Image: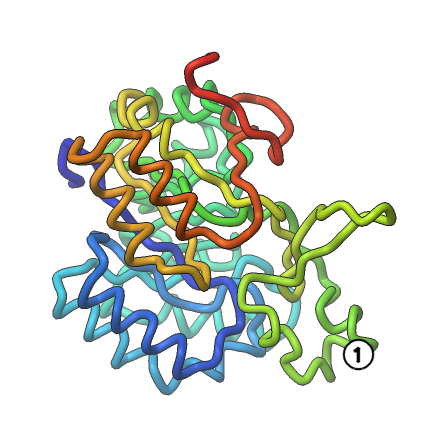
Amino acid sequence: MPDHAGELTLGPVPFNWQPEAWRDFYFRIADEAPVACVYLGETVCSKRAVLFEPYYQAVAERLALAGKTVVFSTLSEVVLKLDRKLVDSICATTDYLVEANDASALLRLRGRAHHIGPAMNVYNEKTLGVLARGGARNFCLPAEMPAAAVRALCEATRDLAVTIEVQVFGRQSLALSARCYHARAHGRTKDSCQFVCENDPDGLELKTLDGRSFLTVNGIQTLSYEYLNLLDELASLRAMGVARFRLSPHSCDMVEVASIFRAVLDARIELREAAARLDAVKPAAPFANGFYYGKPGYSWNSAANH
């Protein structure tokens, strides 16, 4: 079980990075990042998975040797036969835990300890209970969950041997589509995309007609333009009973991001200093925490006012 200060975790890379850069990113995470658990695997597009397959074993072994728990995540949307085969292959692994991001994985994981990812949309206590009875041991909640709902689900775990995980940094996943936005934006089809998404390591930023930055697209996935930042809310989340705090990978210095969040969890740094360091390392887009406060997800709200 996680320690009293909470475990810091690193979610799967949602973007299409160059395979060697992807490998080297995880090698550095293994060697330098103060995270306890690392999620691997393609969660957005099954076509990308083949690009990283040659490196999965080496990355997983490097992380495990560094003392980190490795969990393989499944696709978040299963539409094609290729998608189903990828989910089946991930669920067939017995060397590592599996995180289900689509219901197609549940049948193969039933009765076996596994994690539930944020794309499974666990919004209420009954859903949590049903999945826990099927073997789920950790639930990463959807990013749009407000504090009151997170608290209610934490209370529901008191009689269950499960933990709650919440994303605290990174762009927020908002929707999935059968169509590939990246391909369409470049006049291509999903089947002949030529992996154009590799040109946008943090997603393709969109603007409204009047030029205002709005959303971000990543293949079939729609993400927030803003970066979620729950640094100020860590203490409140921990008091609710949240045991794991997830960072979503981006092209910024994720070792520094992890070090900042770990220092706050361990009370080794003042929030003001931590906020300044995090602001210095993040990409140009603003921070947001609106969903946590039951407000529009793109908004920024001061914890002191709630």
How far across and how far down the image is residue 231, in percent? 36, 34
Q: Quadrant of the N terminus?
A: top left
Q: Is residue 108 visible?
A: no
Identity of the residue drawn at 48% across and 80% down: 18
Q: Which is nearer the eye, 218 or 56?
A: 218
Q: Which is nearer the eye, 139 or 306?
A: 306
Query: In the rendered view, does 115 fall on the left or right side of 144?
Result: left
The residue most toward the top is: 305
Query: In the rendered view, does 185 fall on the left or right side of 280?
Result: right
Instruction: Look at the picture and state if 130 lies above or below 251.
Output: above
Are there few (<14), some (14-19), or many (20+) residues within 10 Å of tag 1? some
How far across and how far down the image is residue 92, in percent? 35, 71
- Amino acid of disc 1: Arg
Instruction: Look at the picture and state if 306 lies above or below 73.
Output: above
How many marks the image carries: the answer is 1
Instruction: Look at the picture and state if 138 lies above or below 67.
Output: above
How far across and how far down the image is residue 141, in percent? 44, 38
Q: Is residue 256 visible?
A: yes
Q: Secondary structure at mark 1?
A: loop
Report the residue marked by disc 1: 188
Q: Quadrant of residue 184?
A: bottom right
How far across and how far down the image is residue 304, in percent? 42, 15
Identity of the residue drawn at 47% across and 33% down: 127
